[in-house]
Structures are given as structure tokens and as C-alpha cells.
Image (spheres, rainbow, N blue to C red):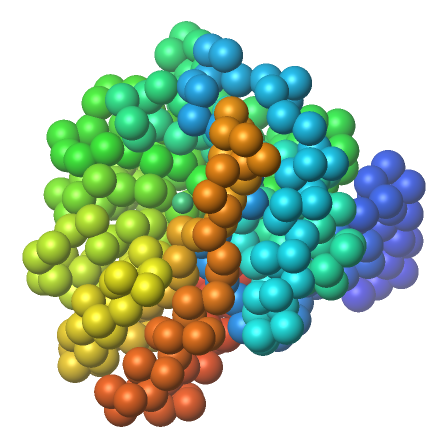
Amino acid sequence: MNRRKFIHKTIATVATAATFPHVTAARAADETIIGVNGPLRPRDLKFTLTHEHVLADFIGAEKYSRDRYVADEVFARALPFLQDVKKRGCVTFIDCSPAYLGRDVLLLKRLADATGLNIITNTGYYGAVEERFLPKHAYTETAEQLAARWTDEFHHGIEGTGIRPGFIKTSVDKAPLTNTQRKIIDSAALTHLATGLTLAVHTGNGNAAREQLVILAARGVSPAARIWVHAQNETDKAYHVEAARKESWVSFDGVNPETVQENVERLQNMKKEKLLHRVLVSQDSGWYNVGEPNGGNYKDYNCIFTQFIPALKANGFSQAELDMLFIANPASAFTVRVRKL
Ligand SMILES: [Zn+2]
């Protein structure tokens, strides 16, 4: 690096650190993952739960408001569950509640600070459930305008906090996608090209997962930039194999005590096809449900540790394969970099 470049870079780093105290020096590194407390190296993630929730409010975008819950109460309710899963070996916790559905980045930062967990949050909008979680401007603005909002969160932080998103979370129902759902995926593609953030897409079925890849391809974005969230919603395993062969991430994120066996079978199928290196596993568990007394029935995050990993071992999965599923794959999937076709 020549001196001029070095000075330029130093000034940029100082300016960033002064404006956004959570953004630290590692930002300039080539390979970065973004947590609520700033950049992480891929090797810092270690054991990662890639799809969980701390808080959700299903009231819908129209009536959504932070006044509907007391953050201290949510913090107190969530804390012991997060402490518990950390003790069991979780190092990184990826919170998938999007804007207008329970994303509260200051709450997540408090929980990260109190537990020592790495926590990662997101930008983007949730178009599934007949679009009831989309704000009005999602209908009036273009894909470019929506992408500009999400890209701004990447550069400047969310809602004036300086806390940056580590991925794009969007969602669509079953195929065929509505026009607005297609626009949301297009916005995610544009945001990916501008930021390198991975898109995690809650998806209704296999054909909806396919349709997303067509929209991404029109923007020149590789399937490797997309996580097919809730791939278990598609019962035909051929779709999982097809997506993973195209290098999409395939996320089986509904592990709970009732679904251990069916998820073992999904992973056995992917292993047979030599595609475990494109698979993510999580629980979609938690959360403080706004509107219910003390958040309602908060489900713990422990099943992967107490039941699922023992079941995988009993079915012949090696430690190397477990490390791939829970350490290497999440680190690769959430590393910020532009992935073009
Ligand atoms: Zn979820």
C-alpha cells in the first residue's frame, strides 16, 4: 500500500470510528461478518444458530410500534434462555426478526453485551403472510428506492443507532410470488450487489425458492448469495438437492423435539448427495411474543444441543460433519462479499 492510500484509509477509519462507536478497526478486513457489536472475523463465529428469534410482534405493519412492549421486560425474559444456550456451546446467535415484525437492535445489543454471545441482526422487509408486515412505502417505492433504504442501514446503521445489519432478511409465500414479493426479492438482489450482504429468504415452497433464483439471475446475482430459509416447508427433497447443486444455501431451521427424526432424514439425504457443505440447521425458536402476558410461551434454544446433535451422531454423522454444519457453513454463508453469477 502506498503512503497516499494509507493516509486515506486511516482518515476513513478514524471518521468511521468517531461516527459509529460500534464499528471498529476490523471493518477494513477483506472477510467480514457484521454483528450488533461490530465486525467479526469468520473464525470468530464458531458454533452458530443461524435462524432464531428474541422478539416478535404479529400485529402487522399498520399498527406496529415499539410502544407495544417494554424493552426491559423482553430483556429479562430472553436473557436466561440466551445464557442457557451459550453455556451449552452456542457462540453466535442470528436473530431473524425483521423490521415491522420485532427487530429491536438496541435490545439485541444489550443481550449481546450481557451474555457475551455474538448476535447478528438484519435489514430488509418481510413479504410473506399475504404481505401484512410490509409498510405502505413498500408498495409506492421502486425496488431501487427500497434497496437504497436497506443499503443505507448497511453503511450508516439502523435507526440512528450505528448498529449495522449482517444480512438481508426477506420473505415470500408459496409460488407464484406476488408482484410486491417479486419486487422485494429484486430489492434484496440490488442490496446484495451494493453491500455483499447475504439474503435469507423465508420461503413458502420449492417453486417459490426457484422463482427467487430467476429474479436474482436477472440482476446477475449468484444463488450462493441466497439462503433458502424454511426449506423444510418443501416436502419434495429433490428441490433441496437442486438448490444446493446451484450453490444456494439450504436452511432446515425447524428443529424442535417433535421434528428431530424428520430433520435427521433431511440431512441424511443431503449427505448422500454430497451437499452437506450447502446446508444450514437451526430451530426458529424463542421468542417474546408481543401482546401476550410476559411474552407468552417462550421456547428455549436447546434442542439442537440436547437432542439433535446426539441424534445425528447416533445416525453416523462425524464430528467433522457437525463442525461443517454448525461452524464452517454459517461462517461462509454470512461472510459479507458480493457473489455474482
Ligand atoms: Zn423465523
Image location (x, y in percent) of residue 301? 49, 60
In the rendered structure, the answer to whether residue 1 lies left or right of residue 121 reads right
Image location (x, y in percent) of residue 35? 66, 53
In the rendered structure, the answer to whether residue 214 lies left or right of residue 309 reads left
The residue drawn where x is 56% and y is 45% is 54
**Toward which corner of the image does residue 304 lie, by quadrant?**
bottom left
The residue drawn where x is 33% and y is 88% is 313
Q: Give the quadrant of ligand 1.
A: top left
User: Does residue 102 show up?
Assistant: no
In the rendered structure, the answer to whether residue 61 lies left or right of residue 25 reads left
User: Does residue 113 show up?
Assistant: yes
* Front residue of 122 and 298: 298
- Single out the residue that lies furthest toward the front: 293
Is 138 situated above or below 198? above
Image location (x, y in percent) of residue 200? 40, 47
* Front residue of 266 and 160: 266
**Toward which corner of the image does residue 73 lie, by quadrant?**
top right
Is 329 situated above or below 16? below
Image location (x, y in percent) of residue 303? 42, 67
User: How many badges with numbers are in the image?
Assistant: 0
Is 53 situated above or below 271? above
The residue drawn where x is 26% and y is 37% is 215
The residue drawn where x is 22% and y is 71% is 261
Q: Quadrant of the N terminus?
A: bottom right
Is 202 situated above or below 33? above
In the rendered structure, the answer to whether residue 296 lies left or right of residue 259 reads right
* Front residue of 143 and 239: 239
